[in-house]
């Protein structure tokens, strides 16, 4: 099968996919239909002119394009690990049509000109690039950035991701200052006074491995602080990569009180537990065997399992999964964090935290669906319509809408290996595992940006 990439500067596409299942969380529709795309827009089935390519959609599912709220594209400064070009190809390969670039680049995205530069590079990329600007200058946690200028340059949110806003006073000022922009503060909830020097989630596995443990309170105290500040100021708060049931409970209660808060969770915090640091390689929804958490000499202490916040324990991971299922978690966001081998294939305590996610997120979600933990509609809502709405993007398969969609084969499986990934980095503990769900076509903004054997890009 030939794999081809296109970009957003290509000509708008025209094609028909016949007999595919169309599932659209924007209106709850789900049924077998023909999808007609004419000049980059979804058209009614009766409007097909002659000469339009007709693709066999039997066995395939069409859904709105996925939207990632948390992507590290590493450009500028980290081009050895990823670039805007390679990261957006990885996105298109994974079914994502939008990625939100995190500002912890070198230099950081804390000035309007830098935000505008990333956006301009994204115009010819394989996925839409939206920019999350730094909340503080230099991400130093001292002075807030010029939020109105950054918003005018196109920023869709503000964050010092990689670190929390260090003081309650600054977080309060940020939430107030963002008011006129209408944009959210995206918080990496981690108290450094509790997290510094830790390597994995605190608990029996960390104790057995002898690694310093990160207590769940490191997340909860910042979540509670920021919820109080959002409630008091009326500011918009988005908590990213939640990893504990306690933090999720606090968010649920705040939502019930009408606080303007939303949150996301990563695919790895749903699917992998702290036992993965000891070498476990089964997903959280699989029944653990008697050896769960026992040391596996082949896979234990893999630096690619080091992530920030650290992989949760199984109970927390399953609680987060229930949060996606019941909608109290707004989105699944990848925290795609590419790092070169010299920063991950090292002693566990030396490894740079983070793993890639754009090309595996959808398949992990589909594995959770296959295991009966999530409905396909809930997964697609968490990956497409709901995150898109948070950054003001529309998604949907209605006639008249711009074609922005993913076509995938839910029954096909693929093996995660270096040669199967288009990201510049391959830092994921999933290497060697077989996952369900193969993306066959991604259409972003009316353009075919990824085609695996459908024959639209040759
Ligand atoms: O694991 C992580 N990696 N968590 C973060 O918050 C930052 C990220 C990165 O930039 O590598």
Image (cartoon, rainbow, N blue to C red):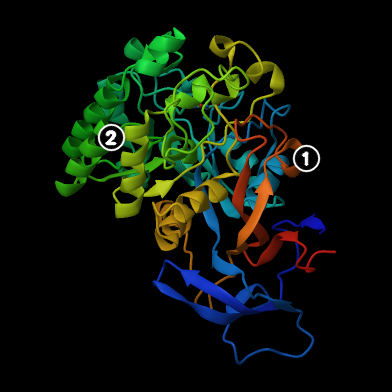
> Residue shown at 74%/59% (left/top)?
452
Position of the C terminus, as image quadrant, is: bottom right
Asked whether residue 202 appears in the rendered view, the answer is no
**Residue 162 x, y percent position in the rendering:** 47, 24
Q: Is residue 316 above or below residue 447?
A: above
**Residue 183 x, y percent position in the rendering:** 38, 45
Q: Is residue 415 above or below residue 396?
A: above
**Residue 24 x, y percent position in the rendering:** 46, 69
Q: Which residue is mark 2?
A: 245
- Find residue 86 and report its image quarter: top right
> Residue shown at 16%/48% (left/top)?
256
Distance in Å between CA atoms under marks 1 and 2: 36 Å
Closer-to-camera residue (300/6): 300
Q: Is residue 194 above or below residue 333?
A: above
Asked whether residue 87 appears in the rendered view, the answer is yes
Q: Residue 170 vs residue 346: left or right?
A: left
Mark 2 secondary-structure assignment = helix
Q: Residues within 10 Å of mark 2 (few under 14, many from 20)?
A: many
Mark 1 secondary-structure assignment = helix
Q: Residue 308 vs residue 90: left or right?
A: left
Closer-to-camera residue (167/56): 56
Closer-to-camera residue (379/299): 299
């Amino acid at each position: 099968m030939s794999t081809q990439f296109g970009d957003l500067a290509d000509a708008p596409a025209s094609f028909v996919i016949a007999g595919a299942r169309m599932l659209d969380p924007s209106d709850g529709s789900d049924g077998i239909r023909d999808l007609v795309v004419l000049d980059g827009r979804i058209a009614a089935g009766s409007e097909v002119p002659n000469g339009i390519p007709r693709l066999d959609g039997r066995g395939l599912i069409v859904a709105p394009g996925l939207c990632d709220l948390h992507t590290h594209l590493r450009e500028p400064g980290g081009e050895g690990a990823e670039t805007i070009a390679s990261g957006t190809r990885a996105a298109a390969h994974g079914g994502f049509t939008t990625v939100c670039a995190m500002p912890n680049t070198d230099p950081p995205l804390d000035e309007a000109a830098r935000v505008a530069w990333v956006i301009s590079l994204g115009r010819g990329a394989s996925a839409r690039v939206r920019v999350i600007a730094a909340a503080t200058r230099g991400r130093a946690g001292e002075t807030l950035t010029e939020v109105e200028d950054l918003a005018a340059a196109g920023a869709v949110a503000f964050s010092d991701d990689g670190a929390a806003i260090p003081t309650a006073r600054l977080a309060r000022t940020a939430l107030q200052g963002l008011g006129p922009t209408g944009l959210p503060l995206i918080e990496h909830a981690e108290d450094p006074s509790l997290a510094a020097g830790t390597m994995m989630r605190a608990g029996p596995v960390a104790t057995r491995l002898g690694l310093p443990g990160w207590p769940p309170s490191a997340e909860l105290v910042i979540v509670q602080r920021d919820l109080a500040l959002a409630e008091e100021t009326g500011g918009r708060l988005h908590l990213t990569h939640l990893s504990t049931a306690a933090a999720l409970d606090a968010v649920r209660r705040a939502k019930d009180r009408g606080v303007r808060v939303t949150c996301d969770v990563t695919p790895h915090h749903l699917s992998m537990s702290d036992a993965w640091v000891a070498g476990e390689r089964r997903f959280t929804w699989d029944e653990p065997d008697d050896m769960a958490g026992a040391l596996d000499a082949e896979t234990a202490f893999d630096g690619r399992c080091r992530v920030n916040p650290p992989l949760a324990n199984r109970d927390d991971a399953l609680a987060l999964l229930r949060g996606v299922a019941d909608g109290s978690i707004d989105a699944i966001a990848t925290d795609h964090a590419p790092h070169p081998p010299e920063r991950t294939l090292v002693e566990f305590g030396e490894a740079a935290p983070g793993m890639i996610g754009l090309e595996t997120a959808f398949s992990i979600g589909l594995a959770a669906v296959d295991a009966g933990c999530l409905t396909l509609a809930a997964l697609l809502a968490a990956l497409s319509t709901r995150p898109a709405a948070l950054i003001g993007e529309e998604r949907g398969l209605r006639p008249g809408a711009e074609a922005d969609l993913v076509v995938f084969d839910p029954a096909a499986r693929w093996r995660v290996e270096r040669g199967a990934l288009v990201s510049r980095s391959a830092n994921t503990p999933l290497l060697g595992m077989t996952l369900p769900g193969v993306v066959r076509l991604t259409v972003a903004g009316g353009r075919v940006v990824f085609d695996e054997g459908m024959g639209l890009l040759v």
